[in-house]
Image (cartoon, grey):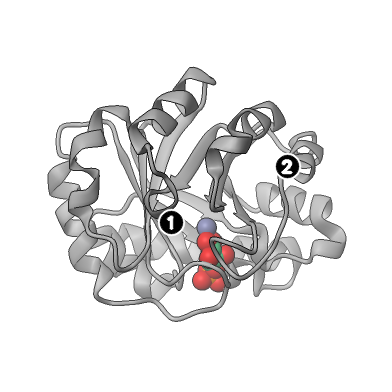
């Protein structure tokens, strides 16, 4: 998936009453990917959106759709997410009974396959599925809500995963509490894709989003 830092604004922190405009604005402001937080009210307490909303947004931008499925039964709708235009489909290891099969299915659908780890889940849980993976999403907060504080203990896990995936074309992505301050920590540990919700959408409109994206990019370069 190329090289260099990837910034993936999470639309969870955007204004849902103007979702299409928000996606277009953050695209123009310099987003690399659009991070889509799908929540089902079971795997996580919160509820957001699913395939129909993703499909509707697909017409608004050409940026990569990075779908993060925080759902209890991801297998049931994998085809629907692929059909809606998600290029990356990330499932949670804690939600998959047959992770190897699920990841193979995501690739069969023509998508890139990602797996996410909750804070308590060890890096080791992925050792035997590395061949099936294009992306590992390390949760740096407990999933379910935006605006939480970064968990410092996750830096160790990022570094372990970086070592475990060395020589492979697997992107390490981080999600939760990412700001310019935490960016330098996670990139030093080995993260390449950075999801940020509040730290980007906390700004005022396109100019504010651009300033926030630039600040994260600058912190990643340092
Ligand atoms: C949390 C979501 C995140 C969230 C990040 O469950 O997966 O993508 O939007 O929000 P911030 O950047 O505000 O911590
Ligand atoms: Zn997410």
Residue furthest out toward the right: 17
Q: Which residue sits at x=56%, y=53%?
A: 71
Can residue 189 be seen here?
Answer: no
Can residue 153 be seen here?
Answer: yes
User: Which residue lies under the disc numbered 2?
Assistant: 54
Quadrant that contains the C terminus: bottom left
Residue furthest out toward the bottom: 149
Quadrant that contains the N terminus: top left
Relative to 124, does residue 15 appear above or below in the rendering? below
Dots 1, 2 in contact, CB < 8 A? no
| Earlier-in-chain disc, 1 versus 2 | 2
Residue 166, located in which quarter of the rendered image?
top left
Q: Nearer the viewer, residue 46 or 187?
A: 46
In the image, 3: left or right of 82? left
Residue 182, located in which quarter of the rendered image?
bottom left
Determine whether the residue tagged by mark 2 lies in a helix, strand or loop. Answer: helix
Q: Residues within 10 Å of mark 2 (few under 14, many from 20)?
A: many
Kindly report the distance in space between the C-alpha atoms of the residues bearing marks 1 and 2: 20 Å
In the image, 45: left or right of 190? right
Q: Which mark, residue 78?
A: none
Percent x, y for residue 36? 62, 50
User: Within the displayed image, which quadrant is ligand 1 positioned in?
Assistant: bottom right
Percent x, y for residue 135? 37, 40
Instruction: Tell us which disc is closer to us: 1 or 2.
Output: 2
Relative to 80, does residue 200 appear above or below in the rendering? below
Q: Which residue sits at x=47%, y=25%?
A: 105
In the image, 192: left or right of 142? left
Percent x, y for residue 68? 53, 49
User: Which residue lies under the disc numbered 1?
Assistant: 194
Relative to 16, does residue 8 appear above or below in the rendering? above
Determine whether the residue tagged by mark 1 lies in a helix, strand or loop. Answer: strand
Relative to 197, does residue 90 appear above or below in the rendering? above
């Amino acid at each position: 998936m190329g090289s260099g830092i990837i910034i993936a604004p999470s639309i969870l922190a955007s204004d849902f009453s103007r979702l299409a405009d928000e996606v277009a604005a953050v695209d123009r402001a310099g987003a690399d990917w659009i991070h889509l937080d799908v929540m089902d009210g079971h795997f996580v307490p919160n509820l957001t959106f699913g395939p129909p909303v993703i499909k509707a947004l697909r017409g608004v931008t050409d940026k990569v759709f990075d779908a993060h499925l925080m759902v209890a039964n991801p297998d049931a709708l994998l085809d629907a997410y692929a059909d809606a235009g998600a290029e990356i489909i990330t499932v949670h290891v804690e939600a998959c009974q047959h992770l190897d099969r699920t990841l193979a299915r995501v690739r069969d659908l023509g998508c890139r396959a990602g797996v996410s780890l909750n804070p308590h889940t060890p890096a080791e849980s992925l050792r035997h599925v590395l061949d099936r993976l294009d992306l590992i999403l390390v949760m740096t907060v407990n999933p379910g809500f935006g605006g939480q504080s970064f968990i410092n203990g996750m830096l160790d896990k990022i570094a372990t995963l970086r070592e475990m995936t060395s020589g492979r074309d697997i992107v390490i992505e981080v999600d939760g509490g990412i700001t310019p301050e935490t960016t330098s920590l996670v990139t030093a540990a080995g993260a390449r894709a950075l999801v940020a919700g509040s730290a980007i959408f906390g700004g005022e409109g396109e100019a504010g989003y651009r300033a926030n994206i630039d600040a994260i990019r600058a912190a990643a370069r340092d």
